[in-house]
Amino acid sequence: MKTTKVIGIFLLVVSLTASSLLHAGTEEFDKTMHPILIEYLKIQEVLAADKTDGVKGAAEQIAALADKVDPKKVTGEHAMHYKALPMKIKKAAQELAQEKEIAAMRDTFKSLSRPMAMWGTMSKPQGISVVYCPMAKGSWLQKGKEIRNPYYGDEMLRCGEIVGGEEYDQGAHKDHTKTH
């Protein structure tokens, strides 16, 4: 009995150590991503509301904030993915800041959402869902689990499915969050 307990504790320690090694350095990275996430969510909500007010300013903020994200300390399984994120986010945000029409903004928002969704899937920021719309062939991050599609707005506001993030891990995907 004692041997089984000791082996169980040993395996738990090994498992926890391996898990922390897979994501070493991400805590600091995630802290610097938080201001980017705040600006990103502003854009997601504005586009979901069929508006463009503030998109340019938020995109410019994201581009500037991306320079402050340092992926050098991230090690482990996803280190290469983390290292590419700041550059991809900055480039897409700069492109988005140049757009004038909502259709072009929505299309360019997909480019910004790709690295943001990758980060959201890996880091799982609190209260954030990663959503995918098969009609738009694009993902995005949003607060909570009530779908608010930035690619179609009112035309298909609820089109999408939670595919990652904290809400997904808490079982939201079992709560019929897929809508079309």
Image: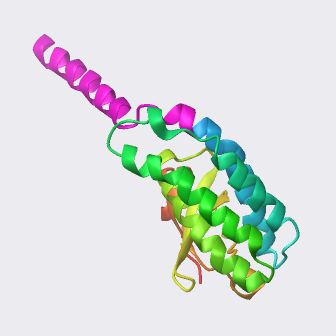
Q: Quadrant of residue 31?
A: top right
Q: Is residue 155 left or right of 119 when viewed as pictured?
A: right
Residue 55: x, y in percent?
80, 67
Q: Is residue 80 left or right of 117 when viewed as pictured?
A: left
Overall secondary structure of the magenta stretch? helix
Residue closest to the eye, 147 or 113: 113
Q: Is residue 11 magenta?
A: yes
The residue depicted at 13 percent of the width and 19 percent of the height is 4
Quadrant that contains the N terminus = top left
Residue closest to the eye, 23 or 58: 58
The residue depicted at 24 percent of the width and 25 percent of the height is 14
Residue closest to the eye, 114 or 62: 62
User: In the figure, 16 relative to 146: above or below?
Assistant: above
| Extreme-right residue of the structure | 53
Q: Is residue 12 left or right of 42 when viewed as pictured?
A: left
Q: Quadrant of residue 99?
A: bottom right
Quadrant that contains the C terminus = bottom right
Residue 98: x, y in percent?
75, 72
User: In the figure, 152 relative to 89: above or below?
Assistant: below
In this rendering, does residue 169 appear at all? yes
The residue depicted at 77 percent of the width and 53 percent of the height is 61
Q: Is residue 141 magenta?
A: no
Which stretch is magenta? 1-29
Q: How is the image coloured?
A: rainbow
In this rendering, does residue 140 appear at all? no
Residue 11: x, y in percent?
21, 25
How many numbered circles are shown?
Answer: 0
Residue closest to the eye, 162 or 134: 134
Residue 100: x, y in percent?
81, 80
Q: Is residue 35 left or right of 19 when viewed as pictured?
A: right
User: In the figure, 9 relative to 40: above or below?
Assistant: above
